Amino acid sequence: MRIDKDANMKERIEFESPSSKWDINNIELTDGGDLFVYGPASQKKNDEYYAETGKKYDNFQFMKISGGKIAFTTATKLDEFEKKLQAAPNMKKIDSYTGKDFEFGNMIFTSTGDIFLNGQEAEIGPKGKGTKYGNIYLFQIGSDGNLKAQFGYKMQESGKEAESVATINSEFENPD
C-alpha cells in the first residue's frame, strides 16, 4: 500500500508470494519510482504464527514494483547461492550466504540493467546488545530478478574491534 502524507491510501498492489514466510529486510525506492523489496524467505508449508516459525530460511526473495504493477517476484534457493559463489582470487573457501544474521548495505544499478546488493554477516548479541560482523557479500542480480553470481570476501581480522563495526564497502561500474 502507498499512503500519502494525510494517511489516505493512494495505491494498493496485491501479489502472491512464492514463500509462506518472507522476512523483508529492505525496501528500496529508486529515483525513477521503481520499488524493490527483498530478504530471506521460506517456502516450507507454514500453518503457525509468523513469530513462532523461527529464522529458518531456504531462499532469498526479490520483488520489483514498477508503474504500480509487480514487474517480477523471484525466490532463489540458498543452494543456488552456493553454486554461484565466487571468492576473491587470494581467498580460501568462503561460506555462502545463509539467509540469516545478515545486514544489507547498498543497491547499485549498472548500465546493463544488473543490480548489485552488498551486505555483511551481522550476528546480534544477547538481548539485542552488540552486533558481531563477519564476511562481506555482494549479490549480482539480473534485470529479471534472478541471481547471476554471489561474491564473497572473508574477514581477515578477528579481533573485537574488527568484528564490532560494519565494514563500509561500495561498488562502482567501470568499462571493463
Image (spheres, rainbow, N blue to C red):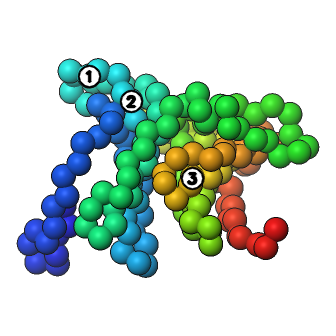
Residue at left offset 49%, top offset 37%: 76
Circle 1: is it few (<14), some (14-19), or many (20+) Cα within 10 Å? few
In the image, what residue type sits under mark 3? Ile
In the image, taking residue 97 as reference, residue 129 lies left or right, namely left
Frontmost residue, 112 versus 65: 112
Residue linked to disc 2:
42
State the residue at coordinates (65%, 31%). Answer: 82
Amino acid of disc 2? Ser
**Residue 46 at x, y percent in the picture:** 26, 22
Residue 155 seen in this snapshot: no
Q: CA distance from mark 1 to mark 2?
A: 9 Å
The residue located at (52%, 59%) in the rendering is 143
Image marks 1 and 2: residues in contact by CB distance under 8 Å: yes
Mark 2 Cα-neighbour bin, 10 Å: few <14, some 14–19, many ≥20: many
- Farthest residue, direction right: 90
Q: Which mark is residue 141?
A: 3
Q: Is residue 121 left or right of residue 1?
A: right
Q: Amino acid at mark 1?
A: Asn
Q: CA distance from mark 3 to mark 2?
A: 19 Å
Q: Foreground mark, 3 or 2?
A: 3
Helix, strand, or loop for circle 3? strand
In 3D space, how far apart are the residues under numbered discs 1 and 3 (Cα atoms)? 28 Å
Q: Which comes before the other along the chain, label 3 or label 2?
A: 2
On screen, residue 114 above or below 80: below
Note whether 80 is above or below 8 in the view shown.
Answer: above
Taking the image as shown, residue 90 lies to the left or right of residue 85, namely: right
Q: Which residue is mark 1?
A: 46
Asked if residue 47 is positioned above or below residue 114 in the image, the reply reads: above
Q: Compared to 118, does 124 lie above or below?
A: above
